[in-house]
Image (tube, rainbow, N blue to C red):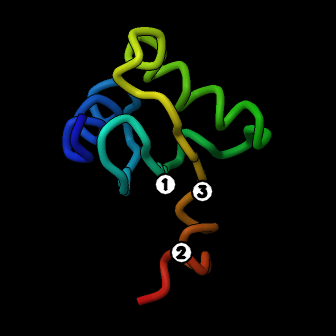
């Protein structure tokens, strides 16, 4: 899979989030930013993203995924968002 394919899948399955994807093959790093994460524990945030990709993980199309999640407020001061 390509990063743009992973991004398209996530955008179609989780509303109101912005995704930044890096990686290649079946190994990807996902940064997800959105209001959907407001009030959720870190585990619940991860589960939301994993569940959106469960078919691809089960099929082996995606193997290793690193996920970081942020609300828009958190993202505004996150080191990963340094310009």
Instruction: Tell me how far mark 1 sits from mark 2, CA to CA.
Output: 9 Å
**Residue 61 image point, x, y percent:** 34, 22
Instruction: Tell me how far mark 3 sits from mark 2, CA to CA.
Output: 10 Å
Residue placed under numbered mark 1 in the picture: 31
- Where residue 25 sits, quadrant-wise, is top left
Q: Does residue 56 sit above or below 19 in this rendering? A: above
- Image marks 3 and 2: residues in contact by CB distance under 8 Å: no
Residue placed under numbered mark 2 in the picture: 80
Q: Earlier in the sequence, mark 1 or mark 3?
A: 1
- Mark 1 or 3: in front is 1
- Between 81 and 67, the one lying in front of the other is 67
Residue placed under numbered mark 3 in the picture: 70
Give the SS element for disc 2: helix
Q: Does residue 67 sit above or below 78 in this rendering? A: above
Q: Does residue 36 sit above or below 32 in this rendering? A: above
**Residue 9 image point, x, y percent:** 28, 29
- Mark 3 or 2: in front is 2
**Residue 37 image point, x, y percent:** 61, 43
The residue that appears at 27% across and 27% down in the rendered structure is 12
Give the SS element for disc 3: strand
């Amino acid at each position: 899979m390509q990063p743009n394919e992973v991004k398209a899948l996530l955008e179609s399955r989780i509303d109101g989030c912005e995704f930044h994807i890096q990686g290649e093959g079946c190994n990807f790093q996902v940064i997800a930013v959105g209001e959907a994460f407001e009030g959720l524990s870190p585990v619940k945030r991860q589960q939301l993203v994993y569940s959106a990709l469960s078919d691809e993980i089960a099929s082996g199309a995606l193997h290793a995924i690193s996920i970081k999640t942020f609300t828009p407020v958190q993202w505004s001061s996150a080191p990963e968002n340094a310009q």
